[in-house]
Image (cartoon, grey):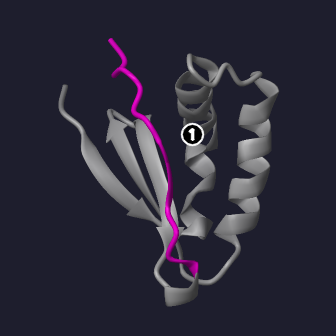
């Protein structure tokens, strides 16, 4: 596996939305959370709202363009609480 981490702003996030949804579903659909797949869509709605806020930044773990993991946060002091999801296995 050869991967990289790419920092993207809210405006640059849209090409990665399907991969982020899959990572979220993999991470939180499994034990101990057992979240329904529909909650991955809810995560994307919240992410889209967050991405429009000033200072939003996402770190994407990528392998050949596929999203393996992600973390989000803000570069501004008042929104310093990050959110993250665990990584997925790389594509074959």
**Residue at image point 38% right, 62% down:** 7
Q: Is 5 rendered above or below residue 67?
A: below
Front-lying residue, 23 or 86:
86
The C terminus, quarter of image: top left
Asked which secondary structure carries label 1, the reply is helix
Reply yes or no: does residue 85 show up in magenta.
Answer: yes
Question: Does 24 sit left or right of 52 as displayed?
Answer: left
The residue indicated by pointer 1 is 20
- Single out the residue that lies furthest toward the bottom: 77
Question: Does 1 sit left or right of 34 as displayed?
Answer: left
To which quarter of the image does residue 54 belong? bottom right
Query: Where is residue 49 drawn, in percent x and y?
Result: 76, 64
Query: Where is residue 11 drawn, in percent x and y?
Result: 61, 68
Front-lying residue, 73 or 8:
73
**Residue at image point 63% right, 21% down:** 29
Question: Does 10 sit left or right of 41 as displayed?
Answer: left
The reply to whether residue 21 is visible in this rendering is yes
Front-lying residue, 90 or 30:
30
Neighbour class for label 1 at 10 Å: few (<14), some, many (≥20)? many
Magenta region: 79-92
To which quarter of the image does residue 2 belong? top left
Question: Does 40 sit left or right of 23 as displayed?
Answer: right
Query: Where is residue 18 drawn, in percent x and y?
Result: 63, 35
Q: Is 61 rendered above or below residue 74?
A: above
**Residue at image point 71% right, 34% down:** 40
Main SS class of the magenta portion in the image? loop
To which quarter of the image does residue 64 belong? top left
The N terminus, quarter of image: top left
- Single out the residue that lies furthest toward the left: 2
Reply yes or no: does residue 31 show up in magenta.
Answer: no
């Amino acid at each position: 596996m050869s991967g990289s981490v790419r920092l993207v702003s809210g405006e640059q996030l849209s090409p990665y939305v399907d991969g982020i949804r899959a990572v979220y579903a993999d991470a939180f659909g499994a034990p101990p959370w057992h979240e329904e797949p529909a909650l991955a869509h809810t995560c994307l709605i919240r992410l889209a709202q967050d991405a429009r806020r000033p200072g939003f930044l996402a770190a994407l773990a990528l392998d050949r363009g596929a999203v393996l993991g992600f973390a989000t946060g803000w570069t501004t002091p008042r929104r310093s609480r990050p959110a993250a999801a665990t990584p997925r296995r790389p594509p074959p």
